Image (tube, rainbow, N blue to C red):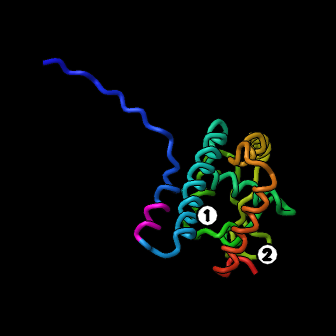
């Protein structure tokens, strides 16, 4: 008996469009919203992967990069950890863990708040600022993970996502 291998040739398929077709075939409502939500989720995975790849040579993750950038934007190059949590919209434990890691790497230091004994500031170091600037160059070179997407759709996507955030009370 002779066995032959059959090579399966598959055509590229947009899996989200296929899911939408199946959704529509079932008669389920809101297939456009489902496809949009699924596309946003998948795009988030792609963008975050690209960002983290670009930040890898700088031994940063996106959350650490965001924290360094936020601190660098302050007048004094230092912010209270509580304020960082509010501005980054993350749990205080996440801020603590991020600052712990940045401090261990010598990119920030904890300093006492000058007027509030209960508060601690995260202050960016010279090395932290240097690494942030180099990482920002890398982020700009990949357009913050958006690659070759034209600027006009990026603006439209941003406008739509602002509306989603506004509907959740995230934006005034």
Residue reaching furthest to the right: 75
Residue 108 can be seen, yes or no: yes
Q: Residues within 10 Å of mark 2 (few under 14, many from 20)?
A: few
Task: Estimate the spatial distance between the alpha carbons at disc 2 and disc 1, rounded to whole Å.
Answer: 21 Å
Q: Looking at the picture, tell me which residue is in the foreground, 105 or 130.
A: 130
**Residue at x 54% of width, y 63% of height:** 35
Instruction: Locate residue 19 relative to residue 111 in the image: left or right.
Output: left
Query: Is residue 21 in the magenta section?
Result: yes
Residue nearest the viewer, comparing 147 with 93: 147
- Tell me where residue 65 appears, x and y as whole percent: 69, 51
Q: Where is 66 relative to 2, above or below?
A: below
Residue 128 in sight from this viewpoint: no
**Relative height, residue 105 to residue 119 (above, below):** above
Residue at 87% x, 63% y is 75
Any mark on residue 152, and which? none
Q: Residue furthest top?
A: 2
Quarter residue 117 falls in: bottom right
Residue at image point 75% right, 69% down: 113
Residue 96 x, y percent position in the rendering: 59, 63
Dominant secondary structure of the residues highlighted in magenta in the image? helix
Secondary structure category for the residue under label 2: loop
Q: Which residue is mark 2?
A: 115
Q: Camera-side residue: 121 or 129? A: 129
Q: Which stretch appears magenta?
A: 20-26
- Residue at horizontal 59 percent and vertical 56 percent from the top: 44
Which image quarter holds the N terminus?
top left
Q: In the rendered structure, does residue 143 fall within the stretch colored magenta?
A: no
Q: Residues within 10 Å of mark 1 (few under 14, many from 20)?
A: many
Residue 159 percent coordinates (x, y): 76, 67
Which residue is the site of mark 1?
Answer: 95
The answer to which quarter of the image holds residue 2 is: top left
């Amino acid at each position: 008996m002779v066995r032959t291998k059959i090579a399966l040739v598959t055509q590229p398929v947009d899996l989200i469009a296929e899911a939408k077709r199946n959704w529509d075939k079932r008669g389920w409502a809101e297939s456009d919203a489902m496809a949009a939500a699924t596309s946003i989720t998948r795009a988030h995975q792609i963008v975050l992967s690209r960002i983290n790849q670009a930040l890898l040579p700088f031994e940063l993750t996106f959350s650490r990069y965001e924290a360094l950038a936020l601190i660098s934007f302050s007048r004094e190059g230092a912010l209270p950890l509580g304020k960082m949590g509010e501005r980054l919209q993350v749990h205080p434990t996440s801020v603590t863990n991020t600052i712990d890691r940045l401090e261990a790497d010598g990119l920030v230091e904890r300093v006492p708040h000058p007027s509030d004994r209960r508060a601690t500031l995260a202050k960016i170091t010279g090395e932290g600022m240097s690494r942030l600037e180099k990482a920002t160059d890398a982020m700009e070179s990949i357009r913050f993970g958006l690659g070759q997407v034209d600027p006009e759709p990026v603006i439209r996507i941003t406008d739509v996502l602002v509306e989603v955030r506004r509907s959740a009370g995230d934006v005034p």
